[in-house]
Amino acid sequence: MKLTRTPDGYVVQVPDDVVAALGLSDGDVVRVSKPNIIELVVSQYDRDNAIAEKKRLARPLPADYKFDREEANAR
């Protein structure tokens, strides 16, 4: 793999066999992280999908719920 600097940031060139093994295609969002070794993590969610998933998992508050900032800050 090769790291190249561009005006917008960096580009990581990945060999074709690695791309095929990971099932990647043009436009896929990936994240490169380095815990102890470098690993390539494929993100299945772009920003819009992540927001939609968060909204889907949201639970409504009770009708009589009222946020009390003073009470929350008193803790």
Image (cartoon, rainbow, N blue to C red):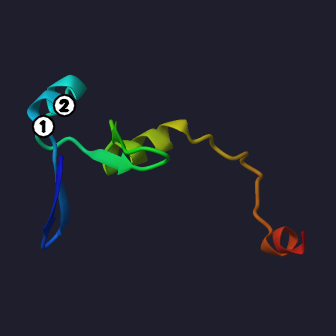
User: Which residue is drawn at the image coordinates 68% and 47% (left, top)?
Assistant: 61
Residue 36 vertical position relative to residue 56 in the rendered view, above or below: below
The dot on residue 56 is none
Of all residues, the one furthest to the right in this rendering is: 75
Q: Position of residue 13 (x, y in %)?
A: 14, 48
Kind of element beneath mark 2: helix
- Three-letter amino acid code at the position of disc 2: Val
Q: Quadrant of the C terminus?
A: bottom right
Placement of 5 over or under 64, stated as above or below: below
- Which residue sits at x=16%, y=70%? 8
How many dots with numbers? 2
* Horizontal side of residue 45 vs 29, given as left or right: right
Left or right placement of residue 40 versus residue 4 in this view? right
Task: Give the amino acid type for the residue marked by disc 1 in the picture.
Answer: Pro
* Mark 1 and mark 2: Cα distance apart in space: 5 Å
Residue 2, x across and y down, in percent: 16, 52
Q: Which residue is mark 2?
A: 18
Please state the horizontal and vertical placement of residue 15, each as a whole percent of the image.
12, 37
Which residue is label 1 attached to?
15
Q: Mark 1–mark 2 contact, CB under 8 Å?
A: yes
Nearest the eye: 43 or 71: 43
How far across and how far down the image is residue 52, in percent?
40, 43
Q: Is residue 29 left or right of residue 19?
A: right
The residue nearer to you, when weighing 36 against 24, is 36
Q: Residue at x 20, y 26 (%)?
A: 23
Residues packed near mark 1 inside 10 Å, few (<14), some (14 to 19) or many (20 plus): few
Frontmost residue, 67 versus 29? 29
Q: Is 4 positioned to the left or the right of 66 in the image?
A: left
Which residue is at 40% across, 49% downward?
33
Callout 2 crowding tier (Cα within 10 Å): few <14, some 14–19, many ≥20: few
